[in-house]
Amino acid sequence: MHDSCLSQRRWSRLRLFILVSLCGWCTTLSTLAADARRPNILWISTEDISAHLGCYGDPHAKTPRLDQLAREGVRYSHAFVVAGVCAPCRSSVITGIYPTTLGTQHMRCQATLPAEIKCFTEYLRSAGYYCTNRSKTDYQFKVPSEAWDQSGGRGHWRNRPDPDQPFFAVFNFTTTHESAITSDNKYQQMTKALPRQLVTEPATITTLPPYYCDTPVTRKDWARNYNLIAAMDRQAGVLLEQLKEDGLADNTIVIFWSDHGIGLPRGKRWLYDSGMHVPLIVRIPEALRVGNQGKPGTVNNELVSLIDLAPTLLNLAGIKIPRVMQGRAFLGTRLTAPRQYVYGARDRMDERYDIIRAVRDQRYKYIRNYEPFKAYYQYMNTPEKGASMRELRRVHALGQLPPAAARFMAAHKPLEELYDLQKDPHEINNLAASGAHQTILARMRQAHLQWVLDTRDLGLLPEPEIVLREQQFKSRYAILRQPGGESLVQQLRKTAGLSLRGIDAIPELLQGIDADDAAVRYWACIGLGNLAAGARQHQAAVRAVLQDPSPSVSIAAARALCRMNEPAPALPILVRHLKSPREWVRLNAAIVLDEIDDQARPVIKNLQVALQDKQNKYVVRVANRALNELLKTHNTVR
């Protein structure tokens, strides 16, 4: 009996051992099979270029290596970014979430990610990928330590400890950044090795857009753009050769893209195609293709947003796409329906706020200007240093700009813009008032309004309010996901648009300054300021708002009073906020002081103190601009 029990126990242990071994063996086989399906991925990104490549039909481009990549892969003709500037766009690329949803839409802000949102490379690493980044992050949130195996100037797939480990390697070229067009020294450094036959001469250019002045200064910048792209093309070629040298070309997917359009006026920072339309090329080795995807030499005309890159890469790697991602996979298995629209947003660009949204389909572009009372070209320190921008200012002062260029020097913008990209690729002829296009306008407008609600667009919340509410709800993403978030978006949108109705909206705006939510009160004050000429009899009601607990509302009320020609009670409020410990409050106060021109003369000394702001360079830039206007000086700041 004892021997029988002992045998049964031994047999039980043996069966358990066999089962565990089989499970481990199956798991190993499954892992090996999964690894065999998981391609290496090389991601080449560049900065500040539109689709000025030979493979996109540009007659001046000298880009033989990227043209060869396109012949070996797929060129996407309709690829777009979600913002016309690098950092907001990059936050969307790495997360698959719109910057206006994350709260990363303002340039050089710093958001906190909620736990449910991760960099897509974290999913790749969990699946066994070796992930490197060389070297730009610029996501506008703290980069999680789990995001990269190696990030910095030495990141490379060659550094992975196991040569059989699948990799995702990013190389970002700064060669084409707008600063290389602006700076003689940087331009010479970036192009010094460029062979003479690859240099584009200014006099030969035939592609100058109609919204520029055709002068030697403008042509020089335009030629520099081509030459920097040619230099970047050679850098991309080096990486592609390294893939071949390592025997990896046949099992590595290569993706090339730009973070937004050309770094010249009305390109970078803008939501026209000159700022949103970017090159996108994908080469997929034959063994890794799904169906007809990646067929060499093909052109794909479907709409692609760069927010789609994150889910697409996960899909190619066989990793489940998190439901929180707002993009769609356009390659791999289990694809959803192609896009009908791509969306874009512009918010604070450097030191200037201008809330603009865009929707584009295959043919039409709709733009909604939420602050039409602001000029197209607000003075911004960085672009104003560029020769092309200075040339536009110079020729405009002479009254000699061509009509298309003069249109974008206007002091105000239309509420809505609509363009037929087939007939008007430069987006010059606004069809929003065209009777023949009202059905299209209504459709595109509704697509925009629905997107704002669906994505919980934070754009109409003043930036200081976003920072405050982030502290309360632990992330910006969570702010409009509280009960009542959707109705708040609708209320903000309604209040922000009231002043466009003219003085008939004043009663509603006066009600708005008593609203429970500070952001609604803010837009009510902005509206009263915009209608200052017809609202002067309500100065007492606006004065009462100067002490509002929200700095955003208080500053907006001070602006309204100044526009009503009553600066005396407003200036002490603006000076107080100019000294605030909160940087975005200081910036908002400085912007109003700059806007009110000569009314700010009594506080010149306070503006001079603001030049010493060590935390926020944008405050310094606005204060310097205001002082230059008041004192007729020409001082420059970084």
Image (cartoon, rainbow, N blue to C red):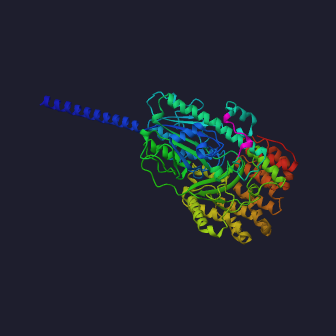
Tell me residue 459's x, y (percent). Answer: 63, 55
Marks counted in the figure total 0
Q: Is residue 112 visible?
A: no
Give the residue at x 72% y 35%.
Answer: 187
> Please, which residue is most extreme toward the bottom here?
504
Who is closer to the viewer here, 235 or 108? Answer: 235
Please provide the residue range marked out in magenta.
Answer: 197-205
Taking the image as shown, residue 590 lies to the left or right of residue 260, namely right
Q: Give x and y (percent) for residue 209.
A: 70, 51
In the rendered image, residue 175, in percent from the top left (x then y), is placed at: 66, 36
Residue 575 image offset from top left, x and y in percent: 79, 51
Q: Nearer the viewer, residue 585 or 379?
A: 379
Please indicate, yes or no, whether residue 236 appears anywhere in the rendered image.
yes
Location of residue 510 by image quarter: bottom right
- Taking 315 as reference, is 598 above or below it? below
Out of 168 and 339, give the one closest to the viewer. 339
Magenta span contains residue 240: no
